[in-house]
Image (spheres, rainbow, N blue to C red):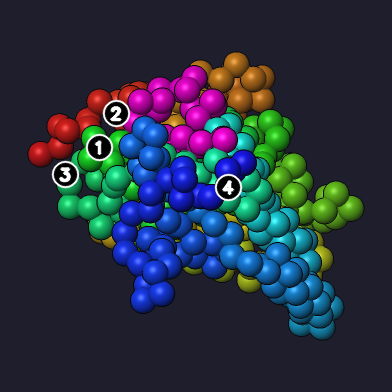
Amino acid sequence: WGVSSVDSVVEFCGVSDENGSQEPVAAASLGQVYKARMKETGQEIAIKVQRPDVEEQIALDMYLLRGVGAFLKKFAGINTDAVGTVDAWGAGFVDELDYLAEARNSEGFMDGIASTPLKDVVFAPRVLDGLSTRSVLTTEWVDGERLDRSSNEDVTVLCSIAMNTYLTMMLELGTLHCDPHPGNLLRTPEGRLCILDWGMVTRLDSDLQISLIEHMAHLTSGDYDEIPRDLLLLGFIPESKADSIEDSGVVQVLADIYGAFITGGRVAAPVNEVVAKLSELSSSKGNLFQIPPYFAYIAKSFSVLEGIGLGINAEYSIISECLPYTSKRLLSDQNERTGVALSSFIFGPDKFDLKNRVVDYKRAEQLITGFGKYTTSAAGELLGKEK
């Protein structure tokens, strides 16, 4: 920090141990968090300090996991790119060790979300650059309660805001926060959503974002002729196996898996079960179908969000929560591929048959209703109005 003593700059809050050392207010595998107050301004701050020797521990763990992944792929018939997934995890963990990178992720999110309707209802803690280093991250202190433990009436609305935020990150901003465990999602006293801990993120380029939107539209509308192309673009099928997709049965199995998932709520397959079935598909289809590493991060994020939603409302449907943002993108995105996806959603497999295609009025109604719900939810119009 460029000072002779930390105590000359801040005053630590909380309790000390029997030796007079300050106790952290929160602890995790990679670091500990202390609450303090700036002596000059009185501002309350959070100081995250990295554990000593953690980099060596992570390197050893990743080395061992990488060996196990290669062994399982070779001898246990597991087709998922296990080594690639471990490498992605390892890269994520290494990134988490660089608190300056974490600061950039947090600030990048705030810059991106500022141009969306979510700008007034969700935020990340402001970073104090002058008090942050590669192993020490200092931010403003944020008071709040865990979203999953809050009894406030607006929690259901905040869950919708959280889902819209993560979809915006994944499909618009291109940087997805990959650690949305309940302790990182806070409801502030003002009723806003605060997202903590930006060390682990995954990045999606614009082509992949559009491919995901197309895939959602094709599955929802039953436009299964487009699924083989989707699987190639999304990395589930190697390009060398493209000619084998249609005769493999993969499309029908995927349709069955997603068909159960789309129902929503507890009567449907939860995200974890869907991922497990995709893993089974990966194992049963030899070298044809594989789960790309980035998808593991997406699945983790949405599984946590679904768990919070179901904990608050037993009828929670993650697909229903995704529809407002998807509707907004399909109706407002000017990308040509998104336009074709919109046609697929409304007309289904007959989208290119201009003479005989018929509008599916139920899905058209879903689009309009979803767009309205996104506008209301993203702007936080229902905050403080739940009864």
Outermost residue, bottom side? 75
The residue at which mark 1 appears reads as 191
Spatial separation of the CA atoms under disc 2 and disc 1: 9 Å
Q: What residue type is labelled 1?
A: Gly
Q: Which amino acid does label 2 sit on?
A: Gly
Outermost residue, right side? 240
Q: Cβ–Cβ below 8 Å for labels 4 and 3? A: no
Q: Does residue 123 belong to the magenta stretch?
A: yes
Which is more N-terminal, label 4 or label 1? 4
Spatial separation of the CA atoms under disc 3 and disc 2: 14 Å
Secondary structure under tag 2 reads loop
* Mark 4 vs mark 3: in front: 4
Spatial separation of the CA atoms under disc 1 and disc 4: 40 Å
Q: Cβ–Cβ below 8 Å for labels 2 and 1? A: yes
Q: Say if residue 371 shows up in the picture.
A: no
The residue at which mark 3 appears reads as 153
Query: Closer to the camera, 13 or 353?
Result: 13
Secondary structure under tag 4 reads loop
* Mark 1 vs mark 3: in front: 1
Which is more N-terminal, label 2 or label 4? 4
Which residue is located at x 58 percent, y 47 percent?
4
Read off the magenta span. Answer: 110-130
The residue at which mark 4 appears reads as 4
Which is more N-terminal, label 2 or label 3? 3
When the figure is inspected, residue 291 is found, relative to residue 102, above or below; the finding is below
Secondary structure under tag 1 reads loop
Q: Cβ–Cβ below 8 Å for labels 1 and 3? A: no
In the rendering, at what x and y percent does residue 126 appear? 46, 35
When the figure is inspected, residue 280 is found, relative to residue 43, above or below; the finding is below
Q: What residue type is labelled 3?
A: Glu
The residue at which mark 2 appears reads as 380
